[in-house]
Image (spheres, rainbow, N blue to C red):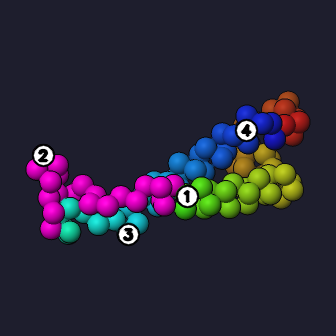
Amino acid sequence: MTITSIIVLYAVAWFMSLFVILPLRLTTQHEAGEIIPGTPPSAPSDLRLGRKMRLTTIVATLIWAAICAVILSGVLTVEDIDVFHRLTAEDIAFFNRM
């Protein structure tokens, strides 16, 4: 794996984890009974963004490490995910060099 693919893989894992974690334990202004004028009732009353970002980083790091371990160990190769058999021998050799 190149450094670029490692960074992109981590960024994808981080943002996917963020979108899953953001709505967890969310209390809206409507549920709290304190609707601030000019905001929708579905706006969060206490977002706790720092806590959610730390949790996102932990979860994303675990997911990223698992995916990297699978890729680097060779358990899953390009040939395994080429279900339509469209890759040529040169394409497979290119991916194996990465």
Q: Secondary structure at mark 4?
A: helix
| Amino acid marked by disc 3 | Arg
Would residue 50 appear left or right of 14 to someone viewing this image?
Answer: left
Q: Is residue 11 above or below residue 21?
A: above
Q: Which mark is residue 38?
A: 2
Residue 79 in the figure: left or right of residue 38: right
Name the residue at 32% across, 61% down.
46
- Report the residue at 61% width, 44% height from top: 11
Which residues make up the magenta segment?
33-53
Which numbered disc, 4 or 3, marks the residue that appears first in the sequence?
A: 4
Q: If you read the primary sequence from the N terminus, does the residue marked by circle 1 or circle 3 appear first?
A: 3
Q: Residues within 10 Å of mark 1 (few under 14, many from 20)?
A: few
Q: Earlier in the sequence, mark 2 or mark 4?
A: 4
Where residue 68 sits in the image (x, y, percent)?
Answer: 77, 53
Which numbered disc, 2 or 3, marks the residue that appears first in the sequence?
A: 3
Give left or right: position of 92 versus 65: right
Residue marked by disc 3: 25
Q: Nearer the viewer, mark 4 or mark 3?
A: 3
